[in-house]
Image (tube, helix red, strand yellow):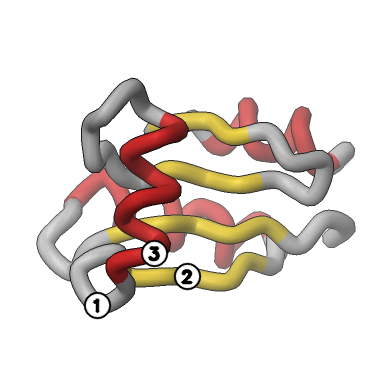
Amino acid sequence: MAGNVTMYSTTWCGYCRRLKGQMDRAGISYTEINIENDPESADFVEKANNGNQTVPTVLFPDGSTLTNPSLAQVKEKVGA
């Protein structure tokens, strides 16, 4: 499916696991970055979420982000 997105996550995040599974089943490609292992990504997530490290934060090809989006929101953004 069109639109490779970047998902910022952590290993312990249940919402991240759920969204990854939904995106896998829907055929939406993504790159996952664990913010616990990447300080620059953690900083990006904080900036996108008013100082909070809230995950999942999804970055789209157009540069926009959504925090804890539904699969429907992701599909809409990638044109699925």
Mark 1: amino acid: Asn
CA separation, marks 3 and 2? Answer: 14 Å
| Residue 46 spot, x, y in % from top left | 32, 39
Q: Residue furthest bottom?
A: 37
Quadrant assignment, res 5: bottom right
Alpha-carbon span between mark 1 and mark 3: 9 Å
Q: Which mark is residue 18?
A: none
Q: Say which residue appears at 82% left-offset and 56% top-offset.
A: 3
Residue at left 34%, top 51%? Answer: 43
The reply to whether callout 3 and callout 2 are in contact (CB within 8 Å) is no
Secondary element at image label 1:
loop
Q: Give SS at disc 3.
A: helix
Q: Residues within 10 Å of mark 2 (few under 14, many from 20)?
A: some
**Mark 2: amino acid:** Glu
User: Which residue appears farthest toward the top when viewing the image?
Assistant: 50
Query: How many residues crowd around disc 3 within 10 Å: few (fewer than 14), some, or many (20 or more)?
Result: few
Q: Is residue 33 left or right of residue 28?
A: left
Dividing the picture into quarters, in which one does residue 17 lie? bottom left
Q: Position of residue 78 (x, y in %)?
A: 80, 42
Q: Nearer the viewer, mark 1 or mark 2?
A: 1
Checking the image for residue 37, the label placed there is 1
Residue 30 sits above or below residue 60 on the image:
below
At a point 44% along the width and 60% down the height, the residue shown is 20
Residue that label 2 marks: 32
Residue sitting at x 27%, y 45%: 15
Quarter holding the N terminus? bottom right
Mark found first going from the N terminus, 3 or 2: 2
* Residue bearing mark 3: 40
Q: Nearer the viewer, mark 3 or mark 2?
A: 3
Q: Is residue 34 left or right of residue 65?
A: left
How far apart are the alpha carbons under marks 1 and 2?
12 Å
Q: Left of 7 or right of it: where is 59?
A: right
